Amino acid sequence: MPSSDEDSLLTRWEPPSFDPPKPPKPPKVAPIQYPTVEEVEAIRDNAYKEAYELGSNQGFVEGRDAGYKEGKESGYREGYKQGYVEADEETKRLQDALGQLLESITGMPEAIAEPLTQLSFEIASRLAANISMERAPFVAAVQEALMRLPRPGENLYLRLRAEEVETWKKIVDDPGLPFACTILVDADVRPGHAYVEVSGARIDVGLEARLALVRNALGLDDTAEELATVNTEALIDSSINMLEDESSDDSHLDEEQHLDPPDSGEVEKE
């Protein structure tokens, strides 16, 4: 009789079965729990809210982008239009300013001619303020006056103010002067004037007269014409004084003639 260990090593052989395999047993399925009406309504509400929020967010983004684009285009058009109008106004303003500038430049020579000439005259006057007087203009004026007189060089006088005597005395006392001249102090002579008088003629040779001639030559004012008027009036006054002097001399001669007959009578009587 075999032992128990040997029995455990033996395998029982069974003939193969040629029957079709048995179908597997279906798995056990838990019973389906259908949702209640309340649960279905809750699910639908949640889905609606989620879809609403999603659509709202998406619509907000798309609307914002569309509004940004439309606003940008509208703002661009408005800004372009406003910028064009402002640029056009600025261009017109610049054109007007340029026209005024060109007009001012066109009239500038006429506008600055007289002030510039006046400035030149003032500068020359200031530069020449400390220069000593030369005798050449005085000599030329006197010689010109003498050439116009029927008896040149006769009774030549220089009438001026007392404070100007020292200035003119240096010229009159110059040994190189081609004529003799006597200084007459006259308080009625206006400052800056000095008159050469000879045989009733009077010519202003003072500083103001020379400045007036220079200003008239520069076209600054009509002082030369005023000077000519003053000289003419002075000549008339001088002529009147001469006539009065001649009348006075004639009256003295008449008085002397009236006194002569008695003397002659006395001589005859003797």
Image (spheres, helix red, strand yellow):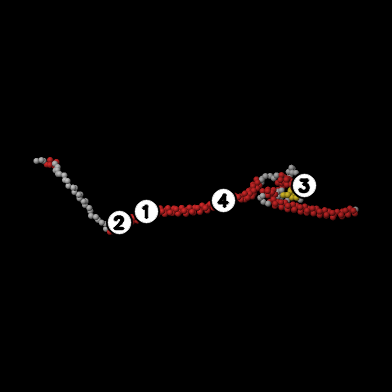
How far from the left and from the top, in percent, is residue 154?
A: 78, 47
Image depth: mark 3 or mark 1 in front: 1
Query: Which mark, residue 93?
Result: none
How far from the left and from the top, in percent, is residue 78?
A: 47, 54
| Amino acid, disc 1 | Gln
Q: Under tag 2, what secondary structure?
A: helix
| Amino acid, disc 3 | Pro
Report the residue marked by disc 2: 43
Quadrant location of the N terminus?
top left
Residue at position x 70%, y 51% from top?
225
Q: Mark 4 and mark 3 in contact (Cβ < 8 Å)?
A: no
- Ranked by sequence position, the earlier of labels 4 and 1 is 1
Q: CA distance from mark 3 to mark 4?
A: 65 Å
Report the residue marked by disc 3: 152
Q: CA distance from mark 4 to mark 1?
A: 58 Å
Q: Mark 3 and mark 2 in contact (Cβ < 8 Å)?
A: no
Report the residue marked by disc 4: 98
Q: Badge 1: few (under 14), some or many (20 or more) residues near its Cα, within 10 Å?
A: few
Q: Is residue 144 visible?
A: yes
| Amino acid, disc 4 | Leu
Left or right of 51? Residue 142 is right
Q: CA distance from mark 4 to mark 2?
A: 79 Å
Q: Badge 4: few (under 14), some or many (20 or more) residues near its Cα, within 10 Å?
A: few
Q: Under tag 4, what secondary structure?
A: helix
Q: Residue furthest right?
A: 270
Query: Which mark, residue 58?
Result: 1
**Quick one: 227 or 95, which is closer to the camera?**
95
